[in-house]
Amino acid sequence: MSGNIGKKPPRREEFIRQLGGAIVTQIQKKKRPTIAGTAKSLDIHRDTLYQWMKEFDVKFNQVYKETVMSMKRTTTEKPVYLIGEALVGEGDEVAHVDLLVGDKDGPVGEAFAQGMSNLSAGHTPLLAVIRPNLPPKPHTLLIPKVTVKNLAEAGKIFGPAQAAVAKAVADSVEDGIVPEDKVEDWVIVCSVFVHPKAKDYRKLYHFNYGATRLALKRALSKYPPIDKIMYDKDRAKHPIMGFKVPRLWRPPYLQIALDVPSLNKTREVVQQLPESDRIILEVGTPLLKKYGVRIIRELREAAKDVFIIADLKTLDVGKVEVDLAFEETADAVVAAGVAAKETLDGFIYEAKKLGIYAVVDMMNIEDPVKKLETLKELPNIVILHRGIDMETGRTLGLERISELRDAFPDQRFLVAVAGGIIPETANEAIEKGADIIVVGRYITQSKDVKRSAREFLELTRLMREDIDLYRVHVE
């Protein structure tokens, strides 16, 4: 603009641009833009500015407002920063790609420049190229995840992996996955896994190409959506870890109380249970008293993916007993509601600190609501429980479920119902809001454990659909 200062612009658009630039200059100098100040910035007399505005039919206040709005948009817009990930293939040639996509003048561009200028032995970044002298756009920096130790391993990076990533980027632009109008504004930082034992270059190319395209598509679509994460997080099994760690915020559940003090009998029962994400195993108090908390770890051999509760019925030293159960991989631990407030507060605090569920059993508590109101925070699960010696008829005091909900409307906790439960009473409990149905002898002493368990799993559509018999991996 400096070369045109003092000269009348030939077109209206150019005049508006110069006027806006002069307004910006005043704002940057912490001055309120005025016609006199703007004329001074343009190196013309104020009367000349008035004349030009009249000729071009431009209103100063309108340009001022639009300039301020534009400056606000410019200062509030954040640079693009997208993240994608994909695992494709199998065997030693399996491809795992993590990538960042973003503006050159943002965090991704900074990471790109840092990677180019800060080389690391065994993890040297390199530009992805379709062939030598032909990089794709957006320019892509490829970074090996696994330390490259020799030229043979380097060849896999500088050959099939490099070409695959570059071709995937170029094809993604051609197919509209990456917007063509962003190829000069964006860069990509792509972290690639290549196994040292990989041998098949064709597979290396094939899998890395697919993984890069999928990761780019996921980044641009902001995959995964939060509802998918919330649904799958308690069902997913990491392929290398080999087991899943469920949580219990999708009721209803069937909790099976393993109270028979025989390890062999207990193992037989567990092995006969149907596969379902709706089953919880409770290591009962008699079993724990006979074998100690170590039995939890032993039962993991037969039920490695199942949520396991240690029914310690803690009455004292709550922190210590939580730690004992936690160290043996219990997912939850039970304290007795009749324990002192201080014991329960310590018990709940320690369980939540370690990331396992705190369960309070309200057996022999006349007023569960009143007991819970004395605590610093609520447990994850409250059990409304009749002891075996008290079981008569089918009245379970189910009205207390709604009492708990009404007393703590803004608190998140699950309500379990226990004590002589059969399918008929279980159905009534679920209808009245129970999240967990605790069943013992009806299943564990049945001649057909699987059939008896299925009687409960068939009570609701959600429990029925979550039986893991026909599970298919779908992305």
Image: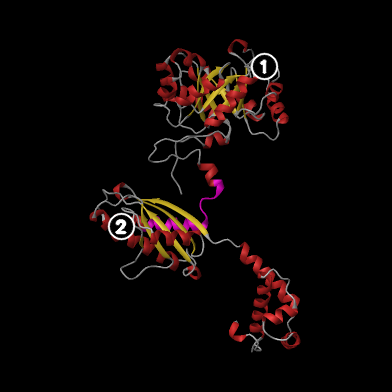
Is disc 1 in contact with disc 2, using a CB cutoff of under 8 Å? no
Q: How many numbered callouts?
A: 2
In the rendered image, residue 242, in percent from the top left (x then y), is placed at 39, 36
Looking at the rendered image, the disc whose residue lies closer to the viewer, 1 or 2, is: 2
**Outermost residue to the top:** 389
Q: Is residue 142 magenta?
A: no
* Residue 361 visible here: no
Image quarter in which the N terminus is found:
bottom right
Q: Please identify the quarter of the rendering in which residue 65 is found.
A: bottom right
Colouring rule applied to residues:
secondary structure
Residue at the (67%, 16%) spot, across then down: 365
* Side (left or right) of 342 relative to 123: right
Residue at the (56%, 27%) spot, across then down: 350
Q: Is residue 214 magenta?
A: yes
Q: Secondary structure at mark 1?
A: loop
Q: Nearer the viewer, residue 3 or 128?
A: 3
The correct choice, above or below, for 194 with respect to 178 in the image is above
Dominant SS of magenta comes to helix
Quick one: label 2, few (<14), some, or many (20+) residues within 10 Å? Answer: many
In the rendered image, residue 190, in percent from the top left (x then y), is placed at 41, 57
User: Label for residue 365?
Assistant: 1
Q: How far apart are labels 1 and 2 at the CA level?
A: 66 Å
User: Label for residue 66?
Assistant: none
Q: Please identify the quarter of the rendering in which residue 5 is found.
A: bottom right
Residue at the (44%, 43%) spot, across then down: 472
Q: Nearer the viewer, residue 354 or 210?
A: 354
Looking at the rendering, the stretch of residues picked out in magenta corresponds to 209-227
Q: Which residue is mark 2?
A: 157
Three-letter amino acid code at the position of disc 1: Ile
Three-letter amino acid code at the position of disc 2: Ile
* Residue 432 visible here: yes
In the rendered image, residue 287, in percent from the top left (x then y), is placed at 47, 15
